[in-house]
Image (spheres, rainbow, N blue to C red):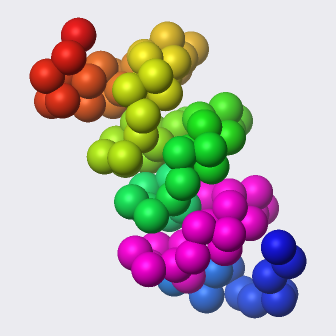
Amino acid sequence: MTLPMTDPDTRWKIASRPHTPPQTLEALATDPALDVRVAVAANTSTPPQTLEALATDPALDVRVAVAYNPNAPWTLLSYLAGDLDREVRIAASQCMSLRGRS
């Protein structure tokens, strides 16, 4: 899906909306603007396969947002619990703990 060129603030607003279609969120997951990718990672409407792709994003903030997404699959949290960055590991571990599994 190709999105029309818009400014980063507009793309961020679209990525933040809970009713944004999954196809749009998937397209925004590769946005050059960090804030847009973080918004996609935090959006509870983001499909699991898009969260999986974002879990390998080079930006720490994106991976942390994936870990805190309540719809991140358990297997994805387990993956993030082994991340090289301590902040991502802590976020994933906290979410795993809150869900009651270890």
Is residue 64 at all visible to an observer of this figure? Answer: yes
Q: Quadrant of the N terminus?
A: bottom right
Is residue 28 at all visible to an observer of this figure? Answer: no
Q: Quadrant of the C terminus?
A: top left
Q: Tell me where residue 87 sits by quadrant.
A: top left
Which range of residues does the magenta coloring cover? Answer: 14-37
Q: Is residue 51 above or below residue 97?
A: below
The one nearer the camera, 102 or 33, is 102
Q: Tell me where residue 31 sits by quadrant.
A: bottom right
Which residue is painted at 82% across and 89% down in the image?
4
Which residue is painted at 67% across and 69% down in the image?
23
User: What is the x, y in percent for residue 16?
Assistant: 46, 74
Q: Is residue 79 above or below residue 11?
A: above
Asked whether residue 23 is drawn in magenta, I would say yes
Which residue is painted at 85% across and 77% down in the image?
2
On the picture, is 52 further left or further right than 16?
Answer: right
Which residue is painted at 52% across and 78% down in the image?
20
Asked whether residue 20 is drawn in magenta, I would say yes
